[in-house]
Amino acid sequence: MASQTRRTHHQVTFAVLAAAVAAYALLQSLVTPVLATIAVDLHTTQNTVTWVLTAYLLSASIFTPIMGRIGDMIGKERVFVATLGALAVGSLLAALATDVQVMIVARVIQGIGGGVLPLAFGIIRDEFPKERLAGAVGAIASLSAVGAGLGIVLAGPIVNALDYHWLFWLPMILTVVAALAAHFFVPESPVRTAGKISWPPALLLSGWLVALLVALSEAPTWGWGSGKVVGLIVLAVVVAAAWVEVERRSAAPLIDMNMMRRTAVWTNNLVALLIGVGMYAVFAFLPEFVQTPKSTGYGFGASITESGLILLPSTVTMFLVGMWAGSFARRIGAKAVVVLGCLVGLVSMALLAFAHQEKWELFLATAIMGVGFGLAFSAMSSLIVSAVPPEQTGVASGMNANIRTIGGSIGAALMASIVTASPAPDGLPREAGYTHGFAMLAGALVVAALAAILIPAAGRRTRGAAESEPEHAGLSLIPGGTVVGDAPE
């Protein structure tokens, strides 16, 4: 009866999860368009203020798999509420910050909120009816990407109507509401993973992520060939190798390396990395392209608000496609949906590279981008969730989201280096820099499509056959009675 009660009210659970993921996703990008404004208000330099963004990405990259693992062990609902609490505290501190050091600390605390995504996927897997599983996972995955784009769209209007402090006040209010709703309405998931957190792997994971992301974020400023960047990348590789070895030998690994070696897991993670390269680089640099003065011969001289609106079509199409992708996967298969999403994303990058003379071309390109990435993210998340045992859902989906963030850092760093490689005499980027940069992102989507082809074809069985057999630990039912998952490896 308790199980039936949970499933009867899964719509309420979904609404709470969606609100929490939206708040976290918004905070990923709300500050991006207004970093210059924050630098002036907090009396700091442009280089220093970039750590307001970098600190958040670093913290989220570290805490996403850790919070997912803790949720798998002690209960996803309680950890979900605690994660939202940290996100709210960080938002409050950021809203009240009067110097950049406090702002950076606040952003580190906010990064703990990265755990909401793997925890939300885990709660959905534990609580939702099987026929609603793929659709719910796809919608939450798309919402996480939609929120990142919507933050850039909303930043200008919020700052113009209020001030930049409300970029933190508004998500904080939404987070507090979501935390209270989660406490009262989201049931505690019954699935647990025995064991404890092994701290040496957690510290090593933190070490190589910090070294890698600092190197990538600072490379455009320090130079890719500088001793500091090369040294940090080498350090990241060495520490990552040590992390893998320690995880393999650990009695209670933070991340099961055997799970990560599953074909359905590593292929989806590779696709996530490459799509992250494209999506976040567009989010970061398309507004800059549109804001470039008309005197350059290619810019539009747009305001922060106007440049953010260029990305609005992508947020709309991404969310709509994400809601519908589950039924589409039922018809052609989740793997085919990922491949199709990568190819559609490739079209959008090609348009940005070679057809950016008119605003309508940019609106069209971002709308197409939303379709492609909405398809890919939704199907990838369902494939990851269905490829691992229920007790590993949190950490597996957390690493997938984490790898997407790392891809975003790589894409932004590469794009910055390409765009600024040969500036014009006035110091502004040349049009060729953006053309080459967007063409590079198109190349990343070509590789993503090829990687998606390597994703194992999902098995298919009828509803009757699936229900007559015990559910495989790595299988999950999607709408229409189709079971998707990786064959045992």
Image: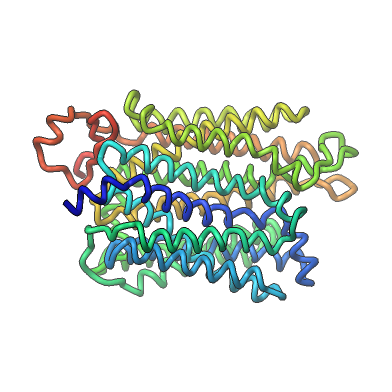
Vertical relation: 154 (above or below) 66: above
Q: Residue furthest left?
A: 468
Tally of marks: 0
Name the colour scheme. rainbow
Which residue occupies 37% across, 49% down? 12
Can you give x and y, in whole percent of width and height, for residue 274 in the image? Answer: 50, 43
Q: Residue furthest top?
A: 331
Residue 472 visible in the displayed image: yes
Which residue occupies 85% across, 50% down? 427
Front residue (pair 308, 3): 3
Which residue occupies 52% across, 49% down? 407
Vertical relation: 427 (above or below) 255: above
Left or right: residue 50 versus residue 130 is right
Left or right: residue 383 versus residue 422 is left
Can you give x and y, in whole percent of width and height, for residue 391 in the image? Answer: 25, 56
Residue 60 visible in the displayed image: no
In which image quadrant can residue 83 be found?
bottom left
In which image quadrant can residue 28 be found?
bottom right
Vertical relation: 343 (above or below) 65: above
Which residue occupies 74% across, 64% down? 38
Screen quadrant of the C terminus: top left
Front residue (pair 233, 166): 166
Can you give x and y, in whole percent of width and height, for residue 441 in the image? Answer: 60, 38
Front residue (pair 461, 342): 461
